[in-house]
Image: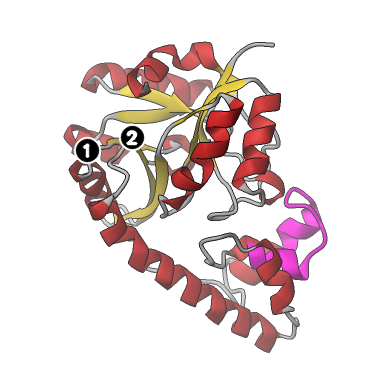
Amino acid sequence: MTEKIDLHVHSSFSDGKDSVNKVLNLAKERDVKMLSFVDHDTNLTYNEALPYAKRLGIDLIPGIEISAYDFKRRRKVHVLGYNYDLDATNIKKLTEPLQTRRHQHSLEQIKKIEDYGIDIDMDEVKKTVGPAGIIYKQHIMHAICDDHYTCPKYTTKYRTLFKNNGPAAGDIEYIDYIAALKAIKQDRGLAVIAHPGQLHSYELIEDNYELIDGIEKYHPDHGPTDYEKIDAVCEKYDLFITGGSDYHGDFGATDEIGIDSGLLKETAQLFR
């Protein structure tokens, strides 16, 4: 089996379905040698996962995916941070209030959905909420829909409730992506723009390349056109590439962990 690497996986510490141990077991089965949990807006996953990762012989890299916003272009931006100081003083200062806002917003969404006429069993919601205790839309959907994330019935119900003029539409106030980049750098980490093809983040790279260390190239939503764009940008500004599965377990479309480690050979050396 070809050795693999995955620098973008999620666990139940944010909006992934699986516990860290389950994710690590799956990674071991797939011969993943290096892995990074980038749970949204929390750095708690690393310390939880590290002992078991060591037992399995998996090189675990500190990671986080910060939910940010490009206020200039009015669009979401996801910022990945790697190999930061584990106390993450500056990162926490930004992300802990964000987690509080997300949880409160989810509770408000539950109330709106119930007012809409759909009963939500909070015990069912809590069954999939992870150690951080933050409720995400995926946890709400789990309580009201038996279908898988990829099922058209699930997609239709999700869009009806959370998108456009749905009863639980709307979002929280996100972090300025420039502040997210700076916080990662202040905590001596490596700042990476996540899946720019998915969120149309290419223009902001040109604006702030001096704060950026890398670009996520290999992602399920990227194809040859994105690969070419990212290669050109990385060559122009001397940035490295990252990649991963964006695994969320049953809360996501991708069900396999790991990509060919040969694609990220130089990055793996940088992270060690």
Relative to residue 240, is residue 63 depicted above or below?
Answer: below
**Which is more toward the observer, 229 or 97?**
97
Residue 186 at what x, y percent from top left?
18, 44
Q: Residue at x 53, y 55 (%)?
A: 14
Q: Which residue matches tag 2?
A: 83
Residue 210's mark? none
Residue 62 at what x, y percent from top left?
40, 38
- Labels 1 and 2: the sequence-earlier one: 2
**Which is more toward the observer, 181 or 58?**
58
Q: Splitting the image into 4 quarters, where does residue 125 fall?
A: bottom right
Residue 188's mark? 1
**Which is more toward the observer, 254 or 199?**
254
Highlighted magenta segment, given as a residue range: 139-157
Residue 167 visible in the displayed image? yes
Q: From the viewer's perspective, is 190 left or right of 99?
A: left
Are the residues at dot 1 and dot 2 in contact (C-beta closer than 8 Å)?
Answer: yes
Relative to residue 39, is residue 1 depicted above or below?
Answer: above
Q: Splitting the image into 4 quarters, where does residue 84 fall?
A: top left
Give the distance between the C-alpha atoms of the residues marked 1 and 2, in whole angstroms.
8 Å
Secondary element at image label 1: loop
- Check if residue 144 falls in the magenta segment: yes
The amino acid marked with disc number 1 is Arg
